[in-house]
Amino acid sequence: MARKLNEREKRIVLIGAVAAVAVFVFGYGAKGLDRWNKSRTVSATAKRRLAEVETNPAKLASLLSQVPVFETPQPQEKQASLFREKLYEQLKKAGINTEPSPPILGKKISISGVNYRVLKIKCKAKCKLDPLLDFLGNLKENPYAVGVEELRIQCDTKEPPEKRKDKDVDVDLIVSTFVKETASKPTVTKSFGPADANNR
């Protein structure tokens, strides 16, 4: 049977428990407090740096104007029509006389479980170099264009460069876009039984 502790022993146990708790709190609490102070310092530094960043609306507008706009790919028929019309409009605006050829389907691409295909349009033209450069510079305004797959420029190399400046060059250009691949519907075949004698 356990005997009762006298007042002196009770004080010793209480002081020992308080000392153990104090050692634990000061040992681990100080480390936690240090980490908390460091995180507050890092957070304050980051907030100060963010506050120092200048958000000039003119700079922001100029940066946003450089980012190409891209529309979400549509099913093949719709995307091909939209892409071709916009491309023809840009070619005409640049002063390049050509009619884009029919679109050509390329390889399949799967992004986040959605299947897309690359659709290419080939253009052949004869034009001066300046309108071609204008067209290529403004191609980013086409919300359906993904990129230029091929660009071939041919000029008459027999003439000196000074005379070639105002001459027309032959241009072969392939521009691409993405089209959303639609699930193909299974074809249903009907089976007919033997012909009725009454239906003949």
Image (tube, rainbow, N blue to C red):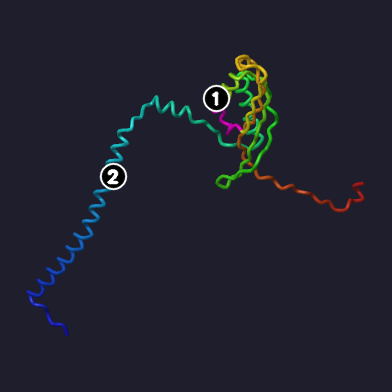
Mark 2 and mark 1 in contact? Answer it, CB < 8 Å. no
Q: Viewed as shown, does residue 35 lie left or right of 155?
A: left
Instruction: Give the residue displayed 90% in from the left and 47% down from the top.
Output: 199
Q: Is residue 93 visible?
A: no
Query: In which image quadrant can residue 102 be found?
Result: top right
| Rendered location of residue 143, percent (x, y) | 56, 30
User: Horizontal and vertical percent for residue 11?
Assistant: 9, 71
**The disc label shown at residue 60, or none:** none
The residue carrying pointer 2 sits among few (fewer than 14), some (14 to 19) or many (20 or more) residues within 10 Å by Cα, namely: few
What is the x, y in percent for residue 191? Answer: 81, 51
Question: Foreground: 147 or 180?
Answer: 147
Q: Which residues are magenta?
A: 138-148
Counting from the top left corner in percent of width and height, residue 32 is at 25, 55
- Name the N-terminal-most of marks 2 and 1: 2
Mark seen at residue 137: 1
Q: Nearer the viewer, residue 72 or 98?
A: 98
* Residue nearer the viewer, 49 or 188: 49
* Residue type of the residue flagged with mark 2: Val
Q: Residue at x 64, y 16 (%)?
A: 167
Relative to 57, residue 15 above or below: below
Give the labeled residue for mark 2.
42
| Residue under the point 66% across and 24% down | 154
Which amino acid is tagged 1?
Gly
